[in-house]
Image: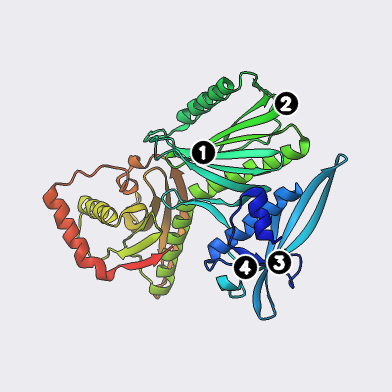
Amino acid sequence: MELKDMLNRDFGLELKISGGYGQSRDDPIVVLDSNKADASITEMEVLRGIGIGRRIIWRTMVRIPITHMQRSLEKIQIETQQVIKNQIITELENYYFDVNIADADDKPLPTAIAYLDKKLKLELPYEIVYLHYQGMIDYESTSAGFGESFAYDCMGIKATVYVYDKNLSDIDEPAVHRELEISSSELVAENPAASRLRKERLLKYQRLLIRTFMIDGDISILAIGTIRSKFVKLRITFDNDRFLYRIVDHFIEVVEKIIIATKNSIQNLYSEYVQYYRNMATNNRVIPKSISGVDENGKQFVFNMTGFNLDHTERDNFIQVILQEENSISYAYGVLTTVNNEQGDRPSEELAIIAATKEIYIQGLFSVIRLEGGSIILKNICVIDGDDPNKSPILSFLSSPSSLSKLDRLKYIKMWNASRNNVMRQQR
């Protein structure tokens, strides 16, 4: 019987594969997907089915593209772990996939992604440590505010990642604590025998609140944090085993890193914009006033505002309209200011660079040093961040409501339309 038929018969997996069992390059599993991302997921689904059938815990170690008999193959090395007579047996195994149809171009296929929320910039991989994606439930379509859930498992461990907002527009730290109490009460109501373990054996996390329970001999963990305006909740249940504890601890650690990386997307925008200004200072010897916005699909524009004769209020209104017209969910902004010295010396120049969303911001201040010959050096003064962008107009272009009249808004829209040919655009 072919591997495809076995995986369908035993686990209900309907996969686009043919060929062999993947034990050697002469007997590869042929992936029939033409899309690279789909082909990557098919590989993971095949390995998941094989892992379930063999009752092993496994994870991907490396993907290596190879060419064999003029065909594009991918060798996936996995690490397997089994507990035999109280010993953990770890082995490395290779599986060979023919990915010629996906036109891999001698490059590894991309990491398999189970879920991507472009608005949140949240990306959940198919594989998190030794746990693998099982499926998604869309609660939001029937119950607004309840979001989606994403199931992962491996032998002895079941985990679910929930992303939701309960229709709350502002999720602050007290709201996260309340949600942990609510979720804990719901867990106990569903499992009257549940008892909380007061001494947490897991590592302490910076972004997640943790509760651990014992339910009929199994361990059940609740972990709650936030990404922008969403709760992220983990519910993990597993056998009371030290080996599984370590895997669960690692799983939570990786999910927390995903949360941090998602939040840090604004850090990337800030860092890129600082580099943009350093390049302008070094190569062009100018410090322009500019605004850049990024929409939920990663489309970015950069607009040099130098030459617009606007006062502070007009400038802020113009920027706000631009960001609205471009459907931006985050932005970066740079403006040069003159600072008068109290001792009456020559005024100094400072560059402020801001990257922000509706919820968070990063602001850096740089001293502008002009050398003989026209060279410019930017010297870092300070960097601050926060989650209260409404504290300053230049931090709140997305978070503060517009007070423009219809006539004024049309004026700024007309200005923007006349400037579009001078806008740089790119896909992030």
User: What amino acid is found at the position of numbered circle 1 in the picture?
Assistant: Tyr
* Residue nearest the viewer, comparing 390 with 169: 169
Question: On the image, numbered disc 4 is attached to which residue?
Answer: 108
Question: On the image, numbered disc 3 is attached to which residue?
Answer: 20
Regarding mark 2 in the picture, which secondary structure is present there? loop
> Which coloring applies here?
rainbow
User: What amino acid is found at the position of numbered circle 4 in the picture?
Assistant: Pro
Outermost residue to the front: 1
Q: Does 196 sit above or below residue 411?
A: above
Write the residue at 32% across / 56% down: 337
Q: Do the residues labelled 2 and 4 touch (CB within 8 Å)?
A: no
Q: Residue 329 location, x and y as percent?
A: 36, 51
| 3D distance between C-alphas at marks 2 and 4 | 42 Å
Question: On the image, numbered disc 2 is attached to which residue?
Answer: 217
Which is nearer the N-term, disc 3 or disc 2?
Answer: 3
User: What amino acid is found at the position of numbered circle 3 in the picture?
Assistant: Gly
Regarding mark 1 in the picture, which secondary structure is present there? strand
Disc 3 vs disc 2: which is toward the camera? 3
* Residue nearest the viewer, comparing 355 with 90: 90
Q: Does 228 sit above or below residue 298?
A: above
Which is nearer the N-term, disc 2 or disc 4?
Answer: 4
Q: Is residue 279 visible?
A: yes
Mark 4 crowdedness (10 Å alpha carbons): few <14, some 14-19, many ≥20: some
* Residue nearest the viewer, comparing 386 with 202: 202
Q: Do the residues labelled 1 and 4 touch (CB within 8 Å)?
A: no
Describe residue 424's horizontal placement relative to residue 24 as left or right.
Answer: left
| 3D distance between C-alphas at marks 3 and 1 | 37 Å
- Counting the numbered discs, the total is 4
Q: Residue 301 location, x and y as percent?
A: 34, 63
Question: On the image, numbered disc 1 is attached to which residue?
Answer: 162
Quadrant of image for the N terminus: bottom right
